[in-house]
Image (cartoon, helix red, strand yellow):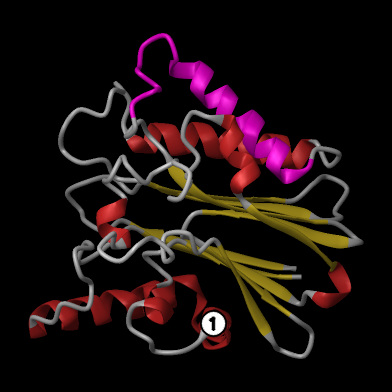
Amino acid sequence: MRIELATAPGSSERPNEDWVSAALPASGRGGVLVLLDGVTPPAEDHGCAHPVPWFTARLGGALVELSGSRPDLPLPEALGAAISRTADAHRATCDLSHARTPQATAVLARWDEREVEYLVLSDSALLLEAPDGTVRAVLDDRLDRLPPGSLASAAIADSTVRNKEGGFFTAAADPAVAARAVTGRVPLSEVRALAALTDGASRWTETFGRGDWGAALGLLREEGPQGLIDRVRKLEAADARAGRARLGRGKTHDDATAVLVEL
């Protein structure tokens, strides 16, 4: 088994809000992948005394523990329990009802000798590669399905659509959002490799269109996660120099994280 991951901040002037971890059980069978993309709040107050990296570290640590040590616990239940545990850690000091309370997108994957179980919440991506090389992207596309005028980049800061019916959902303080995630199970025999990307890394495919998801996974295999991130950074820099508006209202450089697991 090969597991390789890389992460890079979008700016040297602020901390990386992504979080990623992979864990293998002592039995040597199976494993767990957790990838989170913290949602950067606007400059104004967001009701919490803690920065987003504090939140993603707490939530990520709880997810690794619960999904790795409790194989009997379905991933949505693990996510709900991790959200509750994280909320309890700052409920007494922070306004968790605030629409911009710290939150994150989530990708979870867990595999054993029989199957791969997965969960995707919001706009990070999970890629599943079959033995014949076919790659399927597991996506939560609710951001893309927002009404015209509600661009994803604007929606992140829009409390009218975030964690609301008809909008999109992130892991914040309400464990009930775990039921909104895209989930599934695939026989292990049908998965040769899997990969997870925050939207800062998936720009290679989704924003710049340099290759489909199969090509993205091939690039991860050939050049590693850091190679993919480096390519995204070059494309972002070239776009900025040319004055193009391909990134819309999004950041020129976003935190970018990628992980590849070859089973």
Query: Is 203 on the left or on the right of 234, as rendered?
Result: right
Q: Tell me where residue 248 appears, x and y as whole percent.
A: 20, 70
Q: Tell me where residue 67 appears, x and y as whole percent.
A: 72, 41
Q: Nearer the viewer, residue 9 or 200?
A: 200
Q: Nearer the viewer, residue 98 or 161?
A: 161
Residue 4 lies in magenta, yes or no? no
Q: Which residues are magenta?
A: 74-98
Q: Nearer the viewer, residue 61 or 83?
A: 83
Q: Nearer the viewer, residue 180 or 48?
A: 180
Q: Residue at x 44, y 41 (%)?
A: 164
Secondary element at image label 1 = helix
Q: Tell me where residue 11 appears, x and y as whole percent.
A: 21, 56
Quarter of the view holding residue 162: top left
Q: Residue at x 42, y 9 (%)?
A: 92
Q: Which residue is mark 1?
A: 213
In the current view of this chain or complex, which residue is farthest to the right?
114
Q: Residue at x 71, y 35 (%)?
A: 66
The amino acid type of the residue labelled 1 equals: Trp
Quarter of the view holding residue 118: bottom right
Q: Tell me where residue 217 appears, x and y as whole percent.
A: 57, 80
Q: Is residue 224 above or below residue 143?
A: below
